[in-house]
Image: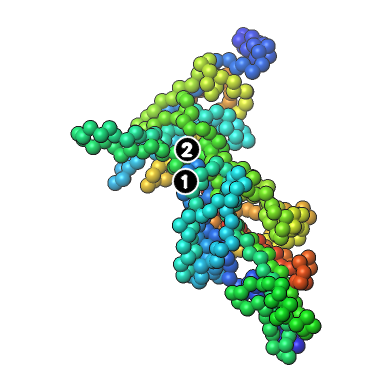
Amino acid sequence: MKIFLKTMVLAAICLPLTATAHKQWLAPSKTVLNVGQWVTFDAGVSTDPFVRDNNAARVENLVITAPDGSVVLPENSATGKLRATFDLQLQQAGTYKVAIVNSSVGASWDDNGQTKRWPARGTTFTAEGFAKEVPANAKDLKVTQSIGRIETFVTAGKPNTTALKPTGKGLELVQVTGFNDLYSGEPATFQFLLDGKPAADVEVEAIADGTRYRNAINEIELKTDKDGRFTINWSQPGLYYLSASVSDDKAEKPATQRRSSYTATFEVLSP
Amino acid sequence: MRHRIPFALCAALLPGTVLAANLNVSIEVPRIDVAEYHRPYVAVWLEREDKSVAANLSVWYQQKKAAPAATGGAPAAAPNPAGGVKWLPDLRQWWRRSGRELQLPVDGVSGATRAPGEHALSFNSDKGGALANLPAGQYKLVVESAREEGGRELIDIPFQWPVKQAQQLKAKGERELGAIVLDVKP
């Protein structure tokens, strides 16, 4: 029973971000373009990256940062059953950051052997609600703050870095090798930051598109070095899903623990 | 041997100037028998050993077409006010190495797409332009071709600059490019 409870509590902790093993992704139609061109994006949640077979991703928290640092709005947004979609015309030269930034707080506790959670699915955290609904002296109370970023990058003409400036909050990726300058056979180096500082020993997973058409996921598993850096060898051209997460106790009150996750999609071209 | 010393002297006395030399390039756009043929986009450049671009020699892409005058008669080709710059990133290496940084059109570099056949390009370091201030070193002539409804191919020919003796260097594409001939002359 004790083990069972622990498992339940663990499951509850993980719930806000990984309700299942599903991955949330953004899939750009292209990432290397010229000024004036249109690009379209799909956003979905599925077991295998980029396979539209489960649910559309929620894109309410989508923020597109233009090469000059301003925020631009997507066009033709629509949400289907299996994917959400939106378009963007690249009116400026440079690199755009397309990001879904989710932030939430969730509590779980043991109420006479039953695991209770708050807030309920689909509702949001409020300080008042928390004070009212979550007993302060609840058994095994865990309050978890989750910060998640799902990003991709597209460039019109010459890349620039204005939109790529990290916010300093949660887990973020910084380019060492250009995000839109990726070619199979050429190793690329990126750096993870946690709250703006190099994040060492973070486990990173990368998966190439097309899992449906091969027998193994063939995930690439890497770990950041002391400077938060890691180097990845793209075995083939195509889209890649890259993901990492970190848990720590640097949560904002009333949360006691924090989970920061990061996912990005990169397009690798053939040289 | 008699010429060597004055050569070296000249180069030493006038740094930055390299003696006159010619690069004659012949590019074969192959005839490809397909139902829907579009002329390829082709970029030609000189690459340094670190793969950066030393000189852009030529880029052929669809040029702007003005709207036809409203005078009736035979229907003119559809207007294309932007030209084909939209598809230039398909010349992947060229785009990465320099295309994306250029303001097109570039005088003496940009040109219309060309029909199947052999096309001669001639560059002379005396006449200014791309070769005028090219420092001595090892270079590659790179030709990249990308075709709508077709494939892409990239071919390079290494050569030494400045040119010491006349030489004919050849390469051949497999599908999207035919024979590439580089004639270098001091």
Across and down, in percent, residue B104 comes to: 48, 32
Identify which residue, B129 or A155, lies in the foreground: A155
Q: In this view, does A198 lie to the left or right of B46?
A: right
Residue B22 visible at all = no
Identify which residue, A84 or B153, lies in the foreground: A84
Locate residue B178: give its quadrant: top left
- Residue marked by disc 2: B144
Residue B95 visible at all = yes
Residue B55 numbered mark, or none: none
The kind of residue tagged 2 is Glu
Residue neighbourhood size for the residue with mark 2, other residues' Cα within 10 Å, grouped as few (<14), some (14–19), many (≥20): many
- Residue marked by disc 1: A37
Residue drawn where x is 70% and y is 81% of the image: A133
Image quadrant occupied by the C terminus of chain B: top right
Residue drawn where x is 54% and y is 56% of the image: A239
Q: What element carries label 1?
A: loop
Query: Which of the colour schemes (rainbow, by chain, secondary structure, one colour) is used?
Result: rainbow
Q: In this view, does A198 lie above or below B47?
A: below
Instruction: Give the foreground label among 2 and 1.
Output: 1
Residue drawn where x is 55% and y is 46% of the image: A155
Return the chain for callout 1. A
